[in-house]
Image (tube, rainbow, N blue to C red):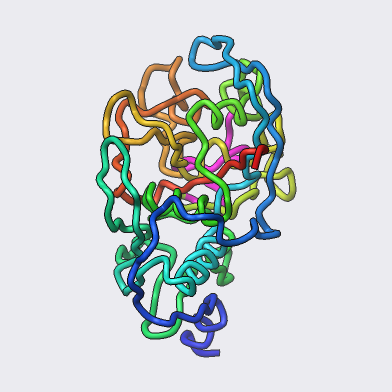
Amino acid sequence: MSLRSILISAVIFLLIIGCKTITVSDNESVHADIPNDIELVPIPAGNYLKGEHNTTAVIPYDYDIMKYPVTNEQYLRFLYLADSLNLIEIDTSGAYGYYSGDQFWPPGNYKLADFSSNEARIGYYPPDYFFTKWRYVENRIEDYSKHPVTFVTWFGAKAFAAFYGMRLPTNEEWEKAARANTINRYPWGNKLSPEYANYKDSGDIYDNDTTPVGHYNGDGNTFASYSPYGIYDMAGNVWEWTNSWWQDSQGKIIKGGSFNSSLNNPPDADLLNYRLMTWFVPGVGYLPMNTSREIGFRCVRDLSN
């Protein structure tokens, strides 16, 4: 089989009608039901332990959170549907949509997803299809459809969530889902090894790259490394956008660490694996229009909806 035939068989074809004029704000009504392949886990109202010093805090309402980060496959489906409804614009550089503005960012069109980077996992061949890229894993070809989507801006994460009647979690909601009332460093406990999570130079078969969501589930050569609520990938793999501002700045908080989080930074022995700890927040906000190979997201659903 030719390389081109292999590539074509691996891509996810989605019909693109063409570039569209954006006519709606981000405060639109829900456009589609939550897809069946998005699993939601209930988080009950009540106390949890917050921060480095395990301070008791409370979230006084129930909510649902995605069991796994949003995948490339799921984000491609959103792009196709949003395009068919004239909600976004698409070209070879990426997807763009309208945001109604907030205290820091004015109303306008913003990039949702970047296709232009060589490391982006989603591509677009005009005039008619998107695809997910692929790589060799243990002498086989595997596409990135089940890996967490990356190179998505905060605006792009928010747009995905709103489209299905969801939203991005706050910093507090994310942390509660990751640790509950435990004092553990990581969602699963206090021990960290390559069998638990995806981090820099961990030696797994996807070393220094994303792993499929839910990869660390106890099957094969991995341990079941989920949170007390049964939620996966909350330490390592990709950082995740939240809806919380970093202090009084224009940047958003990200959580969870990534496949590029080093165990030797910072060097203090008591702070090894610092960036993978459930409570850790980087000391800077990430601008909502930025994209990275290390940042993805998951969504929450308000149970009052």
75 or 303: nearer the viewer: 303
Counting from the top left corner in percent of width and height, residue 161 is at 52, 50
Q: Is the N terminus in the top left, top right, bottom left or bottom right quadrant?
A: bottom right
Point out the residue furthest to the right here. 219
Residue at the (36%, 83%) spot, across then down: 126
4, above or below 179, in the image: below
Which x, y percent locates residue 17?
Answer: 43, 82
- 223 sits to left or right of 274: right
Chief SS of the magenta region: loop
> Observer-nearest residue: 238 or 128?
128
Q: Is residue 198 magenta?
A: yes
Tell me which segment is drawn in magenta: 192-207
Number of marks drawn: 0
Height in image: 256 above or below 80? above
Rendered view: 227 above or below 26: above
Quarter of the view holding residue 156: bottom left
Q: Give the left or right position of residue 16, taking residue 182 as reference.
A: left
Relative to 242, say whether 4 is above or below: below
Residue 120 on image: x %, y % = 38, 62
Residue 229 visible at all: yes
In the picture provided, is 168 more to the left or to the right than 153? right
Residue found 66% across the figure and 37% down from its top: 304
Give the residue displayed 54% in from the left and 9% down from the top.
55
* Residue 96 position in % (x across, y down): 34, 63
Would residue 135 be seen by someone viewing this image from the given angle? no
| Quadrant of the snapshot with the C terminus | top right
Is residue 258 left or right of 102 when viewed as pictured? right
Asked whether residue 35 is drawn in magenta, I would say no
